Image: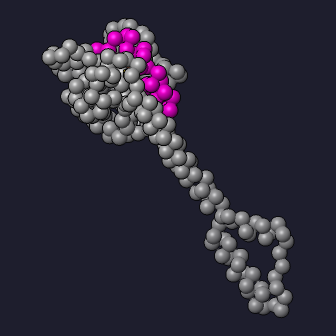
Amino acid sequence: MTQPALDLVIAALERIREKSDRAPRASRTALARLQAPPVAASLREACTSPTEQQLQAARNKADLLAAVRERVSACTKCAHLACSRTQTVFGVGNPDADLMFIGEAPGADEDQQGEPFVGRAGQLLTRILKAMNFAREDVYIANILKCRPDIPAGSFGNRPPTPTEMQTCRPYLVEQIDIIQPSVLVALGTVAVEGLLGTRATMRELRGRWHTYNSIPLMITYHPAYLLRNQAPSEKRKVWEDMLQVLERLDRPISERQRNYFL
Ligand code: SF4
């Protein structure tokens, strides 16, 4: 019974009591109905409780990820990388994210800061996310490899991870995906695809359509570093079209401005 209706019933019962010398009587069923929580309140409770459940799920996921992170930070399975790294680069973002990005390996900047995608390519990824109406904290970002691939002393730049290094480190990423359970995965670049799916193919063959990893929809697109090397508007537009597909898959609203956007 709703609160206004309950107030009317109580007022009527009080009037009966005032006008008669007998207290008003009610059956057990009627009393039980009167004492039942208002329907609207029950509905409110039912609608708000999943949010609390979601918060708890996020806390559980954060705890599970923290345990994996601890194992990764002490990992020496690739002895040569364990010796050369400044630190491991585990992953960053919302443990309960709907959207998860996967890159190949940390570069020099990431190795220094302990966070994936913080160099120039990372800044471009952050701009792409912003155009999608996401903050970095809304999504989860990780690499196949958690250590920076070593390079000869005195040389500069980054090298791609080898297939053996990726296969050795891949189980950590699998654990991350299993915990986060995102609705959509995005693999950035062909090396990330090889690490995740074991598939070697060109971006021309892979991008622009949906793949799956463990039943999770997977979009494959260019690594932001490729867009920094190749500034052609046609290539940037391809990445943005892939991101529009991701937004559609996530049921996120897409504005006219976003539809016409060029990175
Ligand atoms: S790359 Fe991965 S498997 Fe290899 S040492 Fe680093 S954390 Fe361990």
- Using the image as rendered, state which of residue 182 and residue 73 is in the foreground: 73
Label tally: 0
Residue interval drawn in magenta = 160-185
Q: Is residue 247 visible?
A: no
Q: Is residue 63 visible?
A: yes
User: Residue drawn at (78%, 91%), measured in percent from left and top?
Assistant: 19
254 displayed left or right of 52? left
* Rendered residue at 33%/22% (across/down): 82
Residue 262's x, y, as percent?
Answer: 23, 28
Q: Position of residue 217 (x, y in %)?
A: 47, 23
Q: Which residue is more in the foreground, 179 or 84?
A: 84
Residue 184 shown in magenta:
yes
Residue 194 occupies quadrant: top left
Residue 254's x, y, as percent? 36, 35
Say left or right for 27 vs 67: right
Q: Residue at x 43, y 19 (%)?
A: 170
Horizontally, is 41 left or right of 245 in the view?
right
**Where is 98 relative to 33, above or below?**
above
Residue placed most toward the observer, 93 or 22: 93
Quadrant of image for the C terminus: top left
Colouring: one colour
Quadrant of the rendered image containing residue 11: bottom right
* Residue 151 in picture, x, y percent from top left: 23, 15
Looking at the image, which is closer to me, 159 or 151? 151
Residue 52 vertical position relative to residue 203 in the rendered view, above or below: below
**Picture residue at 77% right of the left edge, 85% below the top:** 16
